[in-house]
Amino acid sequence: MIAVDGIKKSSIRSHYQLGTLFYRLLWGPHIHHGLWNGEESASIAQCQLTDTLADMGEIRAGDKVVDVGCGMGGSSIRLALRRKAEVTGITLSPIQRYWAAASAAFRGARSHTEFIATDAETVQFDRESFDVVWSVECTEHFFDKAGFFHRAFEWLRPGGRLAIAVWFQGDHATDDAQRQIVEEVCTRFVCPSIATRQDYTDWIQSSGFRVTHNVDWTQRVLKTWEICKRRVERSGVRQLARFVDREQVAFLDGFDVLLDAYRTGAMQYGAIVAKKV
Ligand SMILES: C[S@@+](CC[C@H](N)C(=O)[O-])C[C@H]1O[C@@H](n2cnc3c(N)ncnc32)[C@H](O)[C@@H]1O
C-alpha cells in the first residue's frame, strides 16, 4: 500500500462538497469510471459498470443494500429502479446527500432509497442488517481500509455479498517512478492511501469473507480519463474551477496523471465481490 501524509477527512468532504458540480457537468450522475466493451457512449459505459458489478454481486429484488460512498446516488437509484433493491446510500458530503435524495425523488425511486450524510468509517449499523455492502470508488478515501471490511462483515446477513470497485496500486508499483505517480494520484484525488489488489484480498478474507470474483478492468475503463480530459479542454469548466478553489483545479489537471498511472501499470482498476458464508 502506498500512503501519503496530509490528507484529512475534512479535505475529502470538501473535495466532494465543491467537486460534485464539476463531476456532474463533466461526467454525469455516476462518479465512477465507465466500463467499455467497444464504442459505447460514456453514459452507457458508466451504467455497464454498475450493472456488471450488480450481476457479480447477485443483487435481487428486495435485497437491502448499503451503498457506501454513494455520491449523487447514481448506483443507489439504478439498483432501486432496475433491481428493485432497497438502498441506503451514505456519503461524507451533505450536498451529495441532498442531491441524491432529490434525484431519487425526481426519478421515482424515493420510497426505495434513503440517503444519509455520515462517515462510513464510524457509522453504526445493526448486525446482519444488509444483504449487500456495495462500494464503488470510495474505499480509496478510507484511513483504515482493513477495519472497514471487518465492519462490513458484521453488517451483512449470512449469504450477504460485498461488492466493491477499486483503484488499486499496481502489482509492481514499487519502483520510485511508479510510486511517485501513485502518490500524486493520492494527493490530487484526496486518497490517504491506495492499496494493491493483494492487500484488499487479504483484508477481505481475514474479515471472514470468501472471494467469488476478483477482476481487472483497467483496459476497459481507461477511456474515462481520455474523455474527461477532452471535455475539460473543450469546456469552460476549468475557468469555473479557478473561481471555486485551487484543489478543484488540481483535480481537473490531474487526469493525465491517472492515464499515466494506468498506462504504466502504476495503478490498476478492478472489482472484488465476496460472500459472507
Ligand atoms: C468517487 S466518489 C464515488 C461515488 C459513487 N460511489 C458513484 O460511483 O457514483 C467517492 C464517494 O465516496 C464518498 N466518501 C469518501 N469517504 C467517505 C467516508 N469516509 N464515508 C462516506 N462516504 C465517503 C464521497 O463522499 C463520494 O460520494
Image (cartoon, grey):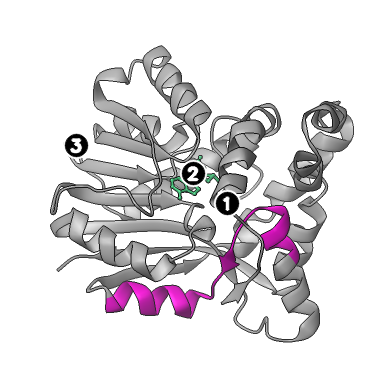
Q: Which mark is residue 61?
A: 3
Tell whether position 248 is magenta. no
Q: Position of residue 271 (x, y in %)?
A: 45, 62
Q: Quadrant of residue 170?
A: bottom right
Q: Which mark is residue 48?
A: 2
Rendered image: mark on residue 37: 1
Q: How far apart are marks 3 and 2 (CA)?
A: 19 Å
| Element marked by disc 1 | loop
Inter-mark Cα distance, 1 to 3: 27 Å
Q: Which residue occupies 83% across, 27% down? A: 243
Would you say residue 202 sits in the magenta stretch? Answer: yes
Q: Dot 2 lies on which element? A: helix
Give whichever of discs 3 and 2 has the lower sequence position: 2
The kind of secondary structure element at disc 3 is loop
Q: Which x, y percent locates residue 240?
A: 82, 26
| Magenta-highlighted residues | 184-206
